[in-house]
Amino acid sequence: MKISFVIPSLPPTYAGGSLRLLRQAQYFSKEHEIKIITCTSGYDKRAEYVFINKGYLKGDNIFSRSVNKLVSFVRIFIHFAFNRPNIVHLVNSTSALSFQSIIASKILRIKIINSCTLYGTDDPLTIKANSLLKYIYFELPNAVVANSPQLYDVCYETISRKGSSYMIPNPVNTDFFLKPNDNNKSGNIELLTVSVVNNRKNVLNLVKAISGILRRFENVNLTVVGPHSRDLEEQSYFEKLKTYIKQNDLTDKIRFVGQVDDVRSYYFDSDIFVFYSTNEGMPNAILESLSCSLPVVCKEIKGVTDFILSEGGGVSAKNDEEFKSSLIGLIESEETRKSIAMDARKNIIDNFSRNKIYKRYLELYREV
């Protein structure tokens, strides 16, 4: 089968949805003919990359922007016309590259699958005020895949063709995210969160929520893994966070690692994963931590975190008090942590393992 994946942003500038689709493309490249259409240069050889330059003409004016978009569309059209993929699968559905890919695919009668990844950004309800864009991004594709019940409900209620919406959660490579049995730990209890340090991820409020716990338990610390200064907005948020930490004498209890290429060692060396984000599609960090047998305590995002943890692995707390009490319970009981850790791993293997999820995608590719 020939599949073209449209992924506007690749590492180092990418979001979770782009990373997920990139891994999917790499996985399917073992048995299928895969090409990746992107606006950023490729970084490995597991699939063929087709680079679409957004800046053929310099300058930020109407003429330059129009010519650049026209040239990009022509390149995409020619690529699809000569390659003739069976499926065009795209992510970040509101990008110009996705727009151009949808139009080119429809003209050439190529099947289209659009992945909807984050409520409030690329879902049909958010952009339904613009009826033309909603029609192009969500009515023209042959299938729209939501990665959580929350997003699926929005797609099902908003898209006119009811049979075109599917719910397929994010996959986890359970062999890659596997905690070694001989992992030696210190006597401390290490809390971990993995996320971009910004307002949506709610890291400041996480620190505020657990500040009393960090002071109460001398052997409890927090590690934050993820970028924190990619732009001025993030830098301002990070400075505010550091100020709060300093004012509350938590400097020795919290460390910021920044962005890392391989997060597994942090999962392995931690005891409890904490997550306080207010808006997610299907957070990979929670899935990966569960796969590494790490108990999870997170703030509830209806139709997301409650769905992930419905078969065990942690607590999706409805409020701050439940969050703190659940976290304290895990800190105080090693037996409870071990029991939940076993449930966490089993939950991922049964419901989110890469082989099972990609089998569902392959069935969808053939069905549409």
Image (cartoon, rainbow, N blue to C red):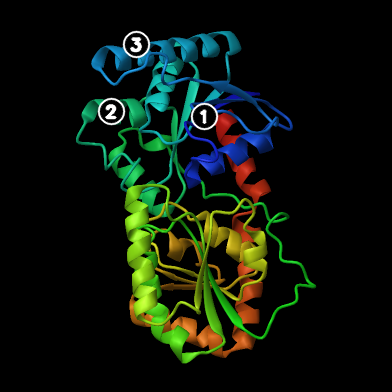
Three-letter amino acid code at the position of disc 1: Thr
Up the image or down, 332 lies above or below 289; here it is below
Q: Secondary structure at mark 1?
A: loop
Q: Earlier in the sequence, mark 1 or mark 2?
A: 1
Decide if residue 16 is on the left or right side of residue 361.
left
Q: Indicate the quadrant where residue 49 lies.
A: top right
Q: CA distance from mark 3 to mark 1?
A: 19 Å
Q: Secondary structure at mark 3?
A: helix
Decide if residue 348 is on the left or right side of residue 13.
right
Give the x, y percent position of residue 59: 32, 18
Pick the residue in front: 212 or 252. Answer: 252
Q: Which residue is at 24% across, 25% downward?
A: 132
Q: Which mark is residue 40?
A: 1
Q: Which mark is residue 67?
A: 3
Pick the residue in front: 68 or 234. Answer: 234
Up the image or down, 75 lies above or below 328; here it is above
Q: Indicate the quadrant where residue 249 lies.
A: bottom left
